[in-house]
Amino acid sequence: FPEEKIRNFSIIAHVDHGKSTLADRILQICGHEVDRKQTLDTLDVERERGITVKSVVASVKHTVGGEDFLLNLIDTPGHVDFSWEVQRSLTACEGVLLVVDASQGVQAQTMANFYVAFELGLAVIPVLNKVDLPHADVDKTMMELNQMFDIEFEECLSISAKSGKGVTEVLDQIVRNIPPPKPIDVSGGALWCFDASVGGHSGRINYVKNIGRVPILPGDRFFPCNDKSDLMSIKDVGRCFPDLQADPEGLLPGQIGYFSTLKAKSRVTGKVLVTDEKSGAKLTEDKSLPFNQLKNSTPSVYASFFPHTDNKGRIKEFEKSVDSLILNDPAVTSTRTSSPAFGSGLRLGFLGQLHLEVFSQRLRDDFETDVIVTSPSTSFRVDADDPSVFEFEVAEEFVPKNFVKEYQEMYSLLTVISPVEYSPVILKAVEERRGSYLSSEEIGDGRLIFKYEIPHSETIRNFHGVLKGATSGFGSFELEELDWRPAELVVLSISINSKIVPELQMITHKHSAEALGRKLTKEFADLLPMQDHKAAICAHITAEPDRQRGFWGSAFGTKSPNFKREDTTRSKANKKIDLQRRQKKIKAEKERLEKLRQIGNVKVPKDAITSLFSLI
Ligand code: GDP
Ligand code: MG
């Protein structure tokens, strides 16, 4: 296929508006076998949750007016936490299908995704989906698109991705309205690598677009622009249908496909690869190129991960699992950490709470690694005189107040699209989390776009769930970083008989600390097993760490776990237990005790701490 016969496009939409269904239907119309389950959502977590978390490439052939065209489709995730994934995919395309569920109208991520495509200067084909539903309202949805994005009524296509109605028309429009790829004028080979995954024989598969003027062939040697040390030799190269199909003739200019390498270590996702040093320098300089406009991803939510066994060798295996997943999800950052209770582990950074959840689940699904995940946290900033401004996210890094000009926390802009009647409950949820109302704008038929500002740290624990619940599922929302603002931060510690539990120490805002501390002491006391002695569990808030005793402060919320008043196990009835059963019981108790940690004379099972994580 010559360039003018190629169309590279992506499907963007709010979650559940039908991207994956449309992608499957397109594959089917173009002659691919499609089984009853969705072909493109292949990960277990995608099938279970019904959401796409990874972009997938598929090439199909479509005939218009007797001429054959090659359509390369990238299915993208819709959720805001994966917007970096979406952006990377879009930089490989010349156009997008903007899918909107006509029974739901424009939603928060429709807006966010539209703006990403718009800023990259891509052709947009508006597609109203689910017109088969009785409550689909095509006219209203067209009005919204017109009002919000200046899209003309005549441009909109109405389809049912489920039944296939109108989908052929969509394919014709892609050929007509999306421009063919334009190769960049450089010497040598040039590739844009927008994604990667683990390949056979521990090599890797790179998903790429040929952005140069020459075909990419097996044996070609590429390196990332400005990093000649990371030289990669191409093993196979070809297209995705979506199964990989190697082609000895290589990947032609303008084409989207893959190449495999034996080297797994290279970090080339989100980079331009070249065969010629000169063209590399030229490419990075040109700020008008789409991939140079791609924003860097910065994690906003952190959690520590520990392999759930006491086996020492386990951490190596665990790190390997995490590394291969990060290859496929390069927005995740990783550093080593350790904990008195859980041993060695990794501290990982994510783009949002859902991103964290999906990653944990993929880790469990793909590698059968049972993992302990600590409760999510975020980073704060301190403005000290020396060294001026830096970020921190764990209590050990907390700088005492008298060395600090000011603590700061990130604020986010929260955009909610919702029917007007939910505005009081949304406001309540926002204000409970120290947020406040900014503005609202009507988009017709009783729906509004609300804007709020809210501290980022208040949105990392099940905020999605809270808003979904408050709006009975009718609200959709989106968070964006705003700016750093002064914050009164304190360290909240939980102690058992005056010994601090390091895993439960955290940085919080002064106003949230007390309620959280009281809740934690109560829940923790309830989670502990029967103890031999009396004990006290307390919460402490401190802005000033005591160097002698660690982080300290006056105790509150004191609770006692249950303890044995008398030994009831020696009653007569129990003496009759036969030997075998007794041995079994003793063995089980011994194993349980091995898993316990002694903190301040109190037995603390690991799972009490992990259960507590799910509450904070
Ligand atoms: P995605 O999150 O955008 O990828 O959405 P999916 O393709 O997974 O679709 C979400 C849900 O909408 C699924 O249950 C689909 O079966 C359903 N769906 C998709 N297209 C249509 C359609 O045209 N009509 C109807 N009635 N349902 C649809
Ligand atoms: Mg999907």
Image (tube, helix red, strand yellow):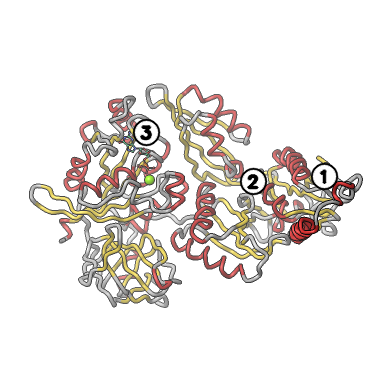
Q: Residue at x 37, y 53 (%)?
A: 55
Q: Is residue 96 left or right of residue 416?
A: left
Which residue is under mark 1? 561
Residue at 34% of width from left, 33% of height from top?
148
Q: Is residue 281 visible?
A: no
Does 134 sit above or below residue 125? above
Mark before the other along the chain sequence, 3 or 1: 3
Q: Nearer the viewer, residue 530 or 54?
A: 530
How far is mark 3 from mark 1, CA to CA? 51 Å
The answer to which of 277 and 570 lies nearer the viewer is: 570
Q: Is residue 57 visible?
A: yes
Residue identified by numbered label 3:
106
Looking at the image, residue 61 lies above or below residue 244: above
Identify the residue at horizontal 25%, vertical 35% (top origin).
159
Q: Position of residue 395 (x, y in %)?
A: 71, 54
Q: Which numbered disc, 3 or 1, marks the residue closer to the eye?
A: 1
For discs 2 and 1, the disc positioned in front in the rendered view: 1
